[in-house]
Image (tube, helix red, strand yellow):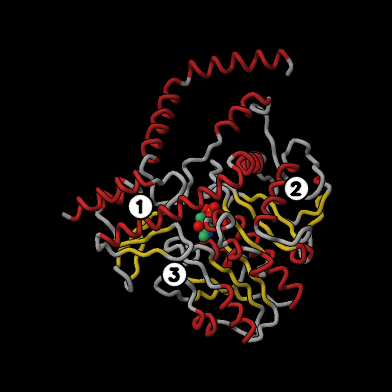
Amino acid sequence: MDNEILKERLTEDKYSEWKNKELIQEYNELSEAIQKTTRGFLGYPLNENSGLSAFYKWYMQSGLLDLVLNNAGDPTLPSHLNVDSLCIEKKVIQDFAQLFDFPKDGFWGMVTAGGTDGNNHGIYFGKRTLWEQSKETPILYVSDQAHYSNRRLGHLQGMEVRIVPTDEMGCMIPSEFEKALDPVKPALIVFAMGTTFKGAIDDMETLNKIIAKKKVKYVYRHVDAALFGGYLIFTGLAHLVSQQKQGYDSIAISGHKWFGVDEPCGIMLCTQKVFAMQKSDSVPYLAMDMPMISCSRCAQSPMKLYWLLHTRGKYGYVRDAYVCLQNAKYLYKELCKMNYPAWLGPASNTVFFKKPCEEIMHKYTLAPDYDSRLCGDMAHIIVMQHVRQPLLDRFLRDLRMSLQ
Ligand SMILES: *Cc1c(COP(=O)(O)O)cnc(C)c1O
């Protein structure tokens, strides 16, 4: 770096240090409060054991620290800005395409700004694919327990959204889906691969049979696997998210949930066939056809994802998945032993149960929901990597005490 610029920066830093004592104090207070919360954080699907400190150490020393990077563009094409990490992003996509069992060379994907962004692109690609095939706007089908973003995105993209009721465990009811399904119109279906509250997995196989039975001509299947997609690929149930086995067209996964990237990000994958149906917008200043909606994208997210995939590694995540699912079963069994109303779906890390008192809700940052068919007011615990048995035991002890 130019010496003059460096000197200027150093004095600026000194200046800001002196000037911003109050700001630092405010930030320190915030940091302490966050750390206190994460010591008992049970209600939301964040991996608070992310393991990126080595990455940050490298980043601090790399010379990138004061620079702005930007991944505008298609990661499968050569870089145009040359201040991006598109080459790493491409590798992330290749790794994930393999993990989700896409055919070799039969996929396209990108690192997104989060699960919602992945759903947005999946739904958008679906709408355009079906339009190309049928010259009609599809109807979007999604369950009432799927993440709210899917409904919003359906509306945003100008589609009729049909909400399909779910059973008590949160799965789309096949007979209700059959009733809702219009055989004449193209169908864009969002399958929930782990609903937000109950952790339910829509039964793709059964629902696909209904689609076949009703002879729907144009169908697009998007899978919202924000959280469950992260760990299922590392378990014996990986076939549930396998593209070649399930035959879906696109899938969205969050990077900041299971994988523990410390900023919102995600992965969106689709088949090459779907990608070929996207009429791109030619953007001369990027020297490429832009298939995606968002232009600027985060350059650090793919670097962190790739770092984690290769440091935590596949075996690390296999172990994490095993431990988390075991701990979810442990929590469920302990609640049952107490005769406390509790539920746990298959392949789920999300235990839901009767809502405890407000003090416990607050202490463990639990999320509320309501289902009159079960016990009315409910809460859930999502067993992520930082949720180990001692923490669960502490929660169970508090719960028992609150019931006396
Ligand atoms: C968290 C979640 C989302 C939203 O993802 P963001 O990354 O928060 O945008 C979507 N669907 C499901 C099933 C989720 O669990």
Q: Residue, x 45% and y 24% (percent of image)?
A: 24
Mark 2 — residue?
73
Q: Earlier in the sequence, mark 1 or mark 3?
A: 3
**Does the CB distance between marks 2 and 3 fall below 8 Å?**
no
Image height check: is 277 above or below 79? below
In this view of the protein, can residue 115 be seen by the observer? no
Separation of residues labelled 2 and 1 (CA atoms): 39 Å
In this view of the protein, can residue 348 be seen by the observer? yes
Q: Position of residue 207 (x, y in %)?
A: 57, 77
Image height check: is 388 above or below 23? below
Q: Position of residue 298 (x, y in %)?
A: 65, 42
Label number found at residue 170: 3
Three-letter amino acid code at disc 2?
Gly
Mark 1 — residue?
366
Q: Position of residue 40 (x, y in %)?
A: 36, 43
Q: Is 319 in front, or is 350?
A: 319
Camera-side mark, 2 or 1: 1
Residue that sits furthest to the left in the current view: 404
Q: Residues within 10 Å of mark 1 (few under 14, many from 20)?
A: many
Separation of residues labelled 2 and 3 (CA atoms): 38 Å
Label number found at residue 335: none
| Image-quadrant location for residue 157 | bottom right
Q: Is 10 in front, or is 374?
A: 374
Q: Secondary structure at mark 1?
A: loop
| Image-quadrant location for residue 343 | bottom left
Q: Secondary structure at mark 2?
A: loop
Three-letter amino acid code at disc 1?
Leu
